[in-house]
Image: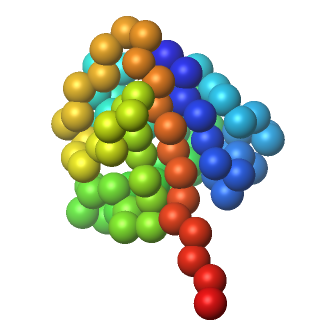
Amino acid sequence: MKVHLSTHVRHYTHGAATVEASGGTLEAVLLDLDRQFPGIKFRLIDEQDGIRKHMNIFINNDKARELKAAISPGDEVHILGALSGG
């Protein structure tokens, strides 16, 4: 499946905005991404195995709230970092 990445994590993928990963759950997809691009999972998942508060992960158009979220063949994952400023 396609995983689309925001710019702040693209240094793990050598600048690639879209990569391929596999898995039947969000957790499995993130583990596959970390296998291919070591260290990326730590930027997305906290020490309690939850999605970091400043990260937004979507499966197709639905915001993922937990790592157990199911992913089907043909789905697309979008990983976005929250923007802030002031």
Q: Residue at x 46, y 31 (%)?
A: 77
Residue sitting farthest toward the right: 15
> Where is 3 relative to 50, above or below?
above
**Whole-percent x, y for residue 13 in the image:** 71, 39
Q: Residue furthest bottom?
A: 86
Can you say whether 29 is above or below 8 in the image?
above
- Residue at (23% x, 46% y) in the render: 66
User: Residue 33, image x and y in percent?
Assistant: 52, 33
- Residue located 27% across and 55% down the image: 49
**Quadrant of the rendered image containing residue 47:** bottom left
Furthest residue to the top? Answer: 73
- For residue 26, side relative to residue 17 (left or right): left
Residue 8 appears anywhere in the view: yes
Q: State which quadrant residue 55 falls in.
A: bottom left
Q: Is residue 55 above or below residue 85?
A: above
Please state if 76 lies on the left or on the right of 84 as rendered.
left
In the image, what residue occupies the spot 41% across and 28% down? 60
What is the count of numbered marks?
A: 0
Q: Colour scheme used in the picture?
A: rainbow
Drawn side of residue 36 relative to residue 28, left or right: right
- Estimate the x, y position of residue 6 in percent, counting from the top left: 64, 48
For the question of whether residue 35 can be seen, the reply is no
Which of the image's four quarters has the C terminus? bottom right
Q: Nearer the viewer, residue 77 or 13?
A: 77
